């Protein structure tokens, strides 16, 4: 496996690309070119604290602004990048960009914690930690401003290596959330071994249920068990006021979803934020 041969040095993953080019994997060279042409964007989706409507964090979601194909969603290139190993080039770009964003927002007097998604491939060895140490210095970023989102599935792919990387991330001062919780195979018992402080409940569990539904019982149990493990809980994909109200009743801590806002470009996000702090979310909690 070509990709694995180069696992020792993050930068050497570029060589995987050279090999790919000799084949017919056009998208692979496309990704490398997209990075040099600055075609990737990080869109930001607000994550709202339910207790007071506070806007204290957001999630960075990648988009590819393709010159001919338009805006491409991550589902159309991330799985491919993961398969070929060029996900590490993307991750490196995402990390640099995320650090620039948090440093900029902090300089503007509006600091937030930014959620950054990692792939299973990024957790395979400790090269990520070396890369991050270097990037923190280059970008003068504060690790407390970044929260890594790791799916249950990624954490379980190579659990021993992933656990080592997760501990390394914490030692560097980053926080970690488990993403898409409920869709993977990890148990709440295994969660206790991971240095995570937050659970993001997958949106498939966050529909407005009636109180007799199994879905409702599951959601209620996840929130309550998560709290008992000392984790804060985020509901993903909240789309309407009924879901918001149900989550208030269930004592959920944070929400993200189209009900609050879709992911936006940085300028739009900053404008939205200013507007929110004047109009406030208080009305949602009434
Ligand atoms: P995720 O990390 O679970 O991100 C949440 C996804 O749900 C985002 O899709 C977001 O736009 C979408 N979403 C948010 N609120 C709602 C809602 O109310 N309703 C519905 N139907 N959807 C909602 P997106 O941006 O297409 O990202 C999809 C996935 O791609 C992400 O899932 C994440 O796993 C991956 N991804 C995104 N950015 C990155 C990245 O920079 N690196 C890596 N490795 N993966 C990324
Ligand atoms: Mg995420
Ligand atoms: Mg998710
Ligand atoms: Mg997801």
Image (tube, rainbow, N blue to C red):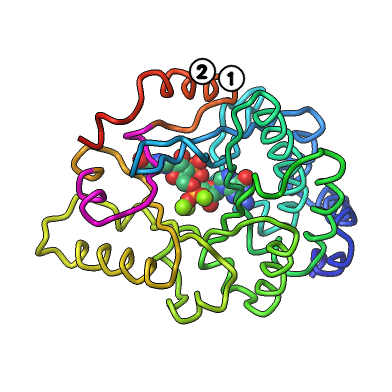
Residue at position x 51%, y 67% in the image: 152
- Residue 241, position in %: x, y? 22, 37
Q: Secondary structure at mark 2?
A: helix
Q: Is residue 95 left or right of residue 18?
A: left
The answer to which image quadrant residue 209 occupies is bottom left
Residue under the point 62% across and 77% down: 159
> For disc 2, does the CB lie below 8 Å from ligand 1?
no
Where does the image place residue 76, in percent across and percent down from the top left? 56, 44
Position above or below: 65 against 155: above
Q: On the picture, is 110 further left or further right than 282?
A: right
| The label number, if any, that marks residue 192 in the structure image | none
Q: Is residue 7 magenta?
A: no
Residue linked to disc 1:
267
Q: Is residue 246 magenta?
A: yes
Q: Nearer the viewer, residue 155 or 80?
A: 155
Total labels: the figure holds: 2
Which stretch appears magenta?
A: 245-260
Q: Is 209 placed left or right of 53 in the picture? A: left
Q: Crowdedness of circle 1 by 10 Å Cα count: few (<14), some, many (20+)?
A: few
Provide the residue designation for mark 2. Answer: 271
**110 or 243, nearer to the observer:** 110
Image quarter in which the C terminus is found: top left
Residue 70, position as x, y percentages in the image: 58, 25
Give me the residue at 64% from left, 47% from top: 146
Q: Position of residue 141 (x, y in %)?
A: 76, 41
Question: Is the residue marked by circle 2 packed among few (<14), some (14-19), or many (20+) residues within 10 Å?
Answer: few
């Amino acid at each position: 496996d070509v990709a694995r041969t180069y696992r020792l040095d993050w930068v050497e993953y570029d060589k995987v690309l050279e090999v790919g080019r000799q084949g017919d994997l056009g998208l692979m060279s496309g990704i490398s070119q997209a990075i040099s042409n600055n075609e990737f964007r990080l869109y930001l989706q607000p994550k709202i604290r339910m207790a007071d409507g506070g806007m204290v964090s957001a999630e960075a979601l990648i988009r590819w602004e393709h010159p001919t194909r338009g805006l491409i969603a991550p589902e159309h290139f991330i799985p491919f990048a993961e398969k070929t190993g060029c996900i590490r080039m993307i991750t490196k770009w995402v990390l640099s960009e995320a650090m620039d964003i948090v440093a900029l927002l902090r300089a503007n007097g509006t600091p937030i914690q930014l959620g950054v998604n990692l792939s299973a491939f990024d957790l395979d060895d400790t090269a990520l930690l070396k890369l991050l140490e270097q990037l923190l210095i280059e970008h003068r970023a504060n690790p407390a401003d970044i929260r890594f989102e790791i799916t249950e599935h990624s954490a379980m792919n190579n659990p021993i290596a992933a656990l080592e990387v997760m501990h390394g991330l914490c030692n560097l001062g980053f926080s970690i959330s488990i993403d898409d919780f409920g869709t993977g195979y990890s148990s709440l018992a295994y969660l206790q071994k991971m240095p995570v402080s937050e659970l993001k409940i997958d949106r498939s569990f966050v529909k407005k249920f009636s109180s007799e539904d199994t879905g409702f019982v599951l959601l209620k149990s996840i929130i309550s068990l998560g709290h008992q493990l000392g984790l804060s809980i985020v509901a993903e994909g909240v789309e309407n006021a009924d879901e918001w109200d149900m989550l208030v009743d269930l004592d959920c801590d944070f929400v993200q979803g189209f009900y609050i806002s879709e992911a936006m470009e940085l300028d739009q996000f900053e404008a939205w934020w200013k507007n929110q702090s004047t109009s406030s979310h208080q009305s949602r909690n009434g």
